[in-house]
Image (tube, coloured by chain):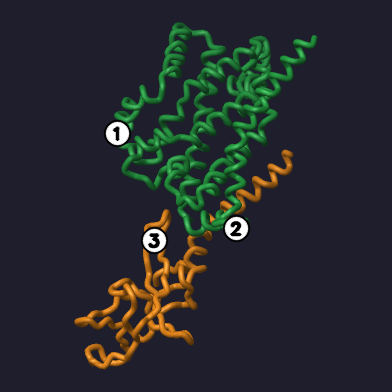
Amino acid sequence: MKKAVTAASVIFCAIIIFFTFFGEKLYYSTKPTVELDRPLRIDDMILLPESAIFSEPDGDYIFTVESEEGFSAEILTVTKVRLTRCEPDESGYFGDGYVTVEAEGYSSAPTVVHTSAPLKDGQKVTEE
Amino acid sequence: MKKKSVFAVLRLTVLAVLAVLFVIPVISTALKSFSFEGKIGLVQYWELFVTNFTYLDFFWNSVFYAAVITAVSIAVSLPLGFLFAKVNFKGRDALFFVFILVMLLPFQATLLPNYIQLRDFNMLNTPLALTVPMMFSPFAVFLLRQFMKTVPNDLIDYTLLETSSVIRTFRCAILTQIKPAVVSLAILIFCESWNMIDQALIFSMENTGIYPLSVVLGDIPENVRYAGGTVYMFPIIMLFVMFRETLEESMEAYKL
C-alpha cells in the first residue's frame, strides 16, 4: 500500500511540475491561432476581406468568434456562419480583395480573417 | 457474552456506516474527475492543467504556505514546549494558562487584532499576511508540552552530563523521544494550513493572486471541478497514508 502511494505521489508530483512549466505553453500551442477583425459596413453592405471567406462544395461561410472570461485566460470559441450572399465588392472604397457578404443574424461580430489551421464549428482558438 | 457480541456487531455497523459516509464524497469526486462531457478519460485533468493553467499557481501558493507555516510552527513550538514542560521558572503556569486561553479563542476573536497588526507592519495583501499569523500556534506548543512531559527528567539530566550541551541534550534526549509526536503535529498543522480560507479572504482582499488553492477552488469552471477537487485532496491523503503508522503510534502512545 505504502509503495503504491509513494509511486502515485511521485507520478502526481511529476505531472504537477510538468504542467506548471508547460501548461500555459500547451494551451497556446495546441489551439489554432487566428487573426480577428470586425466587418466594415457601408450603408447596408457588410464587407469582409476575401481571406475571411471559407468555401465548401455547398456554399461559402465565415467564422465568427465569441469570447468569454475564463479562469486563466480569455476563451475564444469560433462559430461557423453560412453566408447567404457573397460577392466581390464593386464599390471600390477599399480596393481589391474585399467581398460583400450577408448571413442570417450576422452584422458586426468579430470575424476570423486568418487562421493557422483549419477550423471547426465550436473550436477553441487563440488570438494572434 | 451474547450481549457483548451484539454490542460489538452494532458498534462495527455504526462505524462502517460512518466510514462509508466519510469516504463517499472523496471516492465520488475522484471517480467523476475521470469523466468529461460524458466521456471517460483524463480530459478533465487536461482541461484543468492546460485550459485553466493558473490553477497550478494557486496550488503552489498552498504548498508554499503550508510548508512554511508547518516548518516555522514546529521550530517555534519545540523550544516553547520544552520551556513549559521541563524548565522551572516563576510564573510558568500562569504564562501557560495564557497560552491555553489564546488557544481556546476562536479565530474570529483574534481576527481584528491580527488585521490591525498586519496593517501596521504593512503586511496586508502579501504572502506574509497568510503565513505569519498561523506560524505561532498555541495548540502546537500545548501538544508538544504534553509530549515532552512524558520524557523522564533522569534521561535529560544524564544526557546533559554526557554532552554538556543544552542543544545536544534537546536533540538527543527530547527530539528522539517525541519524533512521532512531531511528525503527527506537522501533519495536523500542514492540513490546517492547506485548508485555510478565512485568513486569505480577509488578510489579502486586494491581492487575489496570492490566494491559496482552498479559496479559489470554488471559482474554477464547473466542467473541471472534480479534477480540481481531486488534485486539491491528493497531497493530504498522500500525507495521511504515508505517515498513518506514525500518526496512530503517537496517538496511542500519548493517549490522544
Vertical placement of residue B1 versus B230, above or below: above
Measured as percent of width and height from the top left, residue B193 is found at 49, 34
Label 2 – label 1 distance at C-alpha: 49 Å
The percent position of residue B219, horizontal first and vertical second, equals 42, 47
Residue occupying the point 47% across, 12% down: B96
Q: Is residue B145 above or below residue A128?
A: above
Nearer-the-camera pick, B190 or B123? B190
Q: Of helix, strand and loop, which one carries label 1? A: helix
Does label 1 lie on the same chain as label 2?
yes
The local crowd at label 2, few if under 14, some if 14 to 19, many if 20 or more residues have their Cα within 10 Å, is few
Q: Colour of chain A?
A: orange
Q: Which residue is mark 3?
A: A74
Relative to B249, B203 lies left or right = left
Residue beneath label 2, please?
B39
Residue drawn at x 65%, y 50% is: A11
Work out whether residue A104 or residue B198 is closer to the camera in this orientation and state it. A104
Q: Quadrant of the C terminus of chain B?
A: top right
Residue flagged by tag 3: what amino acid is it? Glu
Report, in whole angstroms, how far the alpha carbon at label 3 lies from the one at label 1. 34 Å
Colour used to depict chain B in the structure image: green
- Which residue was labeled with disc 1? B119
**Which of the 4 image quadrants contains residue B105?**
top left
Query: Chain ID for label 2?
Result: B
